[in-house]
Image (cartoon, rainbow, N blue to C red):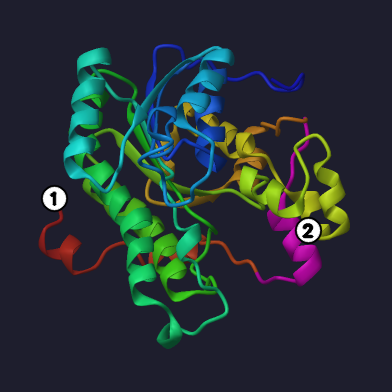
Amino acid sequence: MSPSYTPPNMRGKVALVAGASRGAGRGIAVALGEAGATVYCTGRSSRATRNSTRSASMRLETVEETAERVTLRGGLGIPAFVDHTNRGAVQMLMARIEKEHGKLDILVNNIWGGDPFLEFGKPFWQLDLPKGFQMMEGALYTHIITCHFAAPLLIESAKKSSGGLIVEVTDGDSYQYRGNLFYDLVKTSVIRMAFAMARELRRKNVTVLALTPGFLRSEVMLEHFGVTEANWREAAKKDPNFEQSETPLYCGRAVVALAADPHIAKKSGRVFSSWGLSDEYGFCDADGRKPHWGSHAKKKYGDVMRPCDEGFYLYWTGGMVDSISPNWP
């Protein structure tokens, strides 16, 4: 923990971070560990299957390493090899969590695995369709499957607590074009998922929202620039934007701040950013900094980033369903 950060107490809370092997998922799991939570860390990258079944990324980070970091930070990390495209495996995971802890307070959906299928620089009619559909299966359908099987346990647990929380990790807090048809569909769909699920969970004491990090200083990005976390500023010589990058822990502390907010229900159905939540809650990154990707982008590129605001959400509320069935569900 950085000297200027004291996490809220989340001891006794049980969380599931789906897609916790690396990147934002690992940072979120570790941040929950800082706060004392019990964290199930799932993914397809496992020591036990390293030489047989591997994630699409073919990287070396594992869910076991993430769980160990959670425990080192003061929580309880529990690794679980789970392919979230497999409905039976996800169903078994929820049964395990219920058997071992009797509840689930927080679900974070960070499942991605789409890097091998990205084709930036091509219009949609030139894209490899199987790759695009694989991206949607791995980074969108997995979120739906996981929420589907987690919801009953979250709802039941919320009856005996201050409430449950589902966080959908995305890229960007607006509906602006993201440079590739399938990538755009995946990242905007999970925002809309959060809205739709929030609508259907509105009377169940479970909050659902989406969260985006800024320029994420992930393991992949550090390798891309040929630096480590110790000398990451060297990469800013190649790309000045990297000066405003953030560690995965920053996004994790945003999740912790949200989970500890007694008024979080007011945020249900919306999308938030790590830097915006840092402004609101006051948490910092691992090194004590408060990187602000939104301010940086505005200074460098002008008013090009337009996050969803109150006016935007107005167009999402009401409608035919609310008129015909105002009390459903």
Q: Which residue lies furthest to the bottom in this view?
A: 125
- Do we see residue 329 in this rendering? yes
Q: Which of 7 and 322 is in front in this view?
A: 7
Answer with the quarter of the image where residue 23 lies: top right
Q: Where is residue 8 in the image (x, y as percent from the top left)?
A: 56, 19
Residue that appears at 70% across and 54% down? 224
Could you say which disc has been placed on residue 104 in the image?
none
Residue placed under numbered mark 2 in the picture: 241
Three-letter amino acid code at disc 1? Asn
- Looking at marks 2 and 1 on the same chain, the residue that comes earlier in the sequence is marked by 2
Describe the element under mark 1 as helix, strand or loop. loop
Does residue 104 appear to the left or right of 183 in the view shown? left
Q: What stretch is highlighted in magenta?
A: 288-304
Q: Is residue 78 above or below residue 197?
A: above
Residue placed under numbered mark 1 in the picture: 327
Three-letter amino acid code at disc 2? Asn
Q: Position of residue 168 (x, y in %)?
A: 41, 47
Give the Cα separation between the discs numbered 2 and 1.
48 Å
